[in-house]
Amino acid sequence: MGMSLSSPAFAHMGLVPRAHTCDGADVSPELSWSDVPASAKSLALIVDDPDAPDPAAPKMTWVHWVLYNIPPDASGLPDGQKSATLAPETLEGINDWKRTGYGGPCPPIGRHRYFFKLFALDCTLADLGQPTKVELEKAMNGHVIAQAELIGLYSRA
């Protein structure tokens, strides 16, 4: 059985609740994971939307959250995770709002898919400062030993 990622807030391919979007409190949903490989030295989380700005004609992937060096023995993140309460070794990258932390779904048009991607790595990454998703993916290249994905949907209409 492979690594799994879930949320009590929404099912895989289910609707992301308003509280976790720009139309609500814009707080991160609770996330839980299991079956992290014993050889994992750290975890990374990337949340993005490949349907931006319009699912009928996507032009970019919008990045909502970037975390890395999450301890491999962690089993999840709480609802409304704040930077100040992350495990001390966990580091943050910047999202496409040019800030750290979670930024919830806020699609300008249509129903978008939000990919919550958890990666188990065979190393702890060097402090990359506040990397973008692309910079983190480059640093993770060749170190991913397992991956899990949870997809949520959201539409403002």
Image (tube, grey):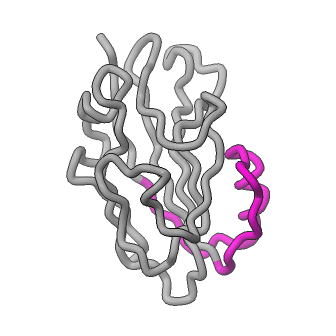
Question: Furthest residue to the front?
Answer: 84
From the viewer's side, name the closer residue of 99 and 46: 99
Residue 116 picture location, percent across and down: 45, 49
Count the marks.
0
The residue under the point 77% across, 58% down is 128
Inspect the magenta stretch and tell me whether residue 140 lies in it: yes
Q: Is residue 146 above or below residue 11?
A: below
Question: Furthest residue to the bottom?
Answer: 38
From the viewer's side, name the closer residue of 57 and 120: 120
- Image quarter of the N terminus: bottom left
- Image quarter of the C terminus: top left
Q: Is residue 132 above or below residue 126?
A: above
Q: Is residue 155 above or below residue 78?
A: above
The residue under the point 74% across, 64% down is 127
Inspect the magenta stretch and tell me whether residue 146 lies in it: yes
Residue 18 picture location, percent across and down: 25, 28
From the viewer's side, name the closer residue of 154 and 89: 89
The residue range painted magenta reads 122-149
The residue under the point 58% across, 49% down is 66
Give residue 61's quadrant in the image: top right
Residue 109 picture location, percent across and down: 44, 11
Question: Furthest residue to the left?
Answer: 8
Asked whether, in this view, residue 8 is left or right of residue 112, the answer is left
Asked whether, in this view, residue 81 is left or right of residue 51, the answer is left
The residue under the point 29% across, 50% down is 79
Give residue 100's quadrant in the image: top right
Residue 119 picture location, percent across and down: 55, 65
Asked whether, in this view, residue 83 is left or right of residue 59, the answer is left
